[in-house]
Image (cartoon, rainbow, N blue to C red):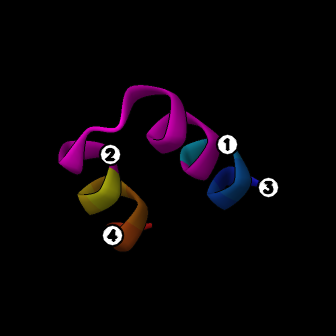
Amino acid sequence: MVFFITLKYKQMKGSEMIDTLYFIL
């Protein structure tokens, strides 16, 4: 669930910081 939200956020923002957050989660 969280992964899906983060992935969607990453696609919208396109920030590498979100990618790192997704990796940690």
Quadrant of image for the N terminus:
bottom right
Earlier in the chain: of badge 2 and badge 3, it is 3
Residue 10 in the figure: left or right of residue 4: left
Q: Contact, CB < 8 Å: mark 1 with mark 3? A: yes
The residue that mark 3 highlights is: 1
| Gap in angstroms between the C-alphas marked 1 and 2 | 11 Å
Say which amino acid is labelled 3: Met
Q: Is residue 16 magenta?
A: yes
Along the line of sight, which residue is nearer the eye, 3 or 11?
11
| Gap in angstroms between the C-alphas marked 2 and 3 | 15 Å
Q: Contact, CB < 8 Å: mark 3 with mark 4? A: no
Q: Contact, CB < 8 Å: mark 1 with mark 2? A: no
Secondary structure that dominates the magenta span: helix
Quadrant of image for the C terminus:
bottom left
Q: Residue at x 25, y 60 (%)?
A: 20
| Gap in angstroms between the C-alphas marked 3 and 4 | 15 Å
| Gap in angstroms between the C-alphas marked 1 and 3 | 7 Å
The residue that mark 4 highlights is: 24
| Gap in angstroms between the C-alphas marked 1 and 4 | 14 Å
For label 4, the crowd category at 10 Å Cα-Cα, with few meaning under 14, some 14 to 19 and many 20 or more, is few
Say which amino acid is labelled 4: Ile
Earlier in the chain: of badge 4 and badge 2, it is 2
The numbered mark at residue 5 is 1
The numbered mark at residue 18 is 2
Image position, residue 14 (x, y; %): 35, 38
| Gap in angstroms between the C-alphas marked 4 and 2 | 10 Å
Give the magenta range.
Answer: 7-18
